[in-house]
Image (spheres, rainbow, N blue to C red):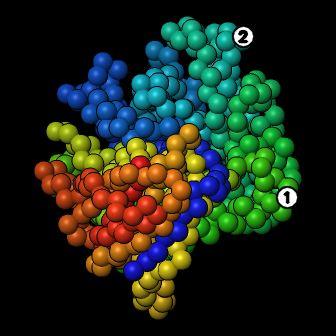
Amino acid sequence: MAKLEINSRRELSKRDKKIFGHFLEHFHRQIYGGIFDPDSAFSNSSGFRQDVLEALKRIEVPIIRWPGGCFVSAYHWKNGIGKQRTPYFDKAWRVEEPNSFGTDEFIEYCRLLGAEPYICTNAGTGSAEEMSDWVEYCNLPSEGKWAKLRIENGHPEPYNVKYWSIGNENYGDWEMGAKDVKEWGRFVRESAKMMKRVDPTIELMAASISDLDWNLDLLREAGQYLDWISIHDYWDKLHNVNDLSDYETCIAYTMDIEQPILKTKYILGSLGYLGKIRISFDEWNLRGWHHPHVNSGTDDYLTPRDKNDINSSYTMADAVFTACFLNQCLKHSDVVGMANFSPTVNTRGAIFTHPEGIVLRPTYFVYELYTRYLGDIIIDSWMSEDSNFLLEKANKTTRIPFLDAIATKRSGSENLRIALVNRHPDRVETVSIQFDSSIQYSSAVFYSVIGDSKDAYNDIGKERVRTIEQPLKLDMQSNLEVEILPHSVNVLVIK
Ligand code: AHR
């Protein structure tokens, strides 16, 4: 039996709810045919899919990063506003971009959802001036050409977009207009200066990688203008695993989640930026993506040949990985203030759209569980007894603890809210939870995301992954034993 001890008097940090953020890119069917589909019977008068919007409201999306991704590095925002929208050829994904979803539509979508907009700018083929014009369009009340244009376009009030990033993965040769280590810091500095001249209250981020020279140059040149540093990770892509078809391979990657956070934290610390610059993990997912135009061959959603659309690829492994990722962000929430699941809809997203409705993939239920039941204060907890299992993969043996846990409470309440993940593919684990006996707790509820097998997934007409709720008896004042199902994600609330 495992033992989890909790010291609820020791509050470690207050998490930022932006950790539960999302990302939407003009890529695959995320925007067109995803959240925006004027021809769909499910869409409202603005062309937004109402079924998707309602599902996103239920997971309380706090922030959306947009419009890319690689897409943004050749995107010119001025072509995506006003009545005249001219399509162009998007060189990142090699498709025609109709430009019918632009800044005004994005802001309207965020407002409907109650989410903060986070705009990622073009630091590939774009310029500091184009970025700062975008800030003018969004945030100036009425001064100058761009604010006046927003008003003319029917939006008299400024949008007050607070979060902006200078570029995307500009270090990568896959990006249009990629930059090298010598250019990046200076480019970020000059862009940041112009953007903050327009609105000094905005918060800015720029891309970092685990390359010491890149980070040293970026932070020395532009650190004083940055509020965040942006990191990305896709575990299969970056770690050269092209086949995540088995649960065990996916689960082995849960042991690597903490590494990029720690590396970035040390870099920030060594240059004196801890407490001033926070980490925005603004693209992440267990899985990378398939180029839709390499794999596609039919529009028939029932026999999708676009590999991103195969719902059976997104299983309980994704749910378990997602929960372990969020647990690490919560654990490091002194420095991680934002994370954006990449992406929200379609590709390898939490929601899949089709002409007759939507499918909620396993990751969706993890967001629902975490946003609904966890608290905002991270409290001290530790596994004082634990079981491990060994995974042999690619000539490597990884020791994996069955359980991954994080304890929280809500400001102003003593109720305990504990996330508990059982990574094991097929063994139930019992955990004894020890807590403060001086507080009068009287009941407990256990919420679990479960699937009928480790490979369970949801699809059109198939719901094998869902959330269940169980009341638990509290026999003792300071101890509760709970059985955790294999490959499950859970939140225990002790009241
Ligand atoms: O999500 C697809 C791509 O993955 C994004 O455009 C890019 O930022 C990342 O490499």
**Looking at numbered disc 1 in the image, what kind of residue is underneath it?**
Leu
- In front of the other: 202 or 298: 202
Please tell me whether mark 1 sits on a helix, a strand or a loop: loop
Give me the disc on residue 143: 2
Where 197 sits versus 230, above or below? Answer: above
Which of labels 2 and 1 is toward the front? Answer: 1
Q: Residue at x 74, y 57 (%)?
A: 180
Question: Closer to the N terminus: mark 2 or mark 1?
Answer: 2
Q: Nearer the viewer, residue 107 or 320?
A: 320
- Res 373 visible: yes
Taking the image as shown, residue 101 lies to the left or right of residue 68, namely left
Viewer-nearest residue: 310 or 4: 4
Instruction: Check residue 100 in the rendering and tell me which mark sits there, or answer none.
Output: none
Closest to the observer, 378 or 298: 378
Q: Which kind of residue does numbered mark 2 sit on?
A: Glu
SS for callout 2: loop
Residue linked to disc 1: 271
Q: Is residue 187 among what the camera can see?
A: no
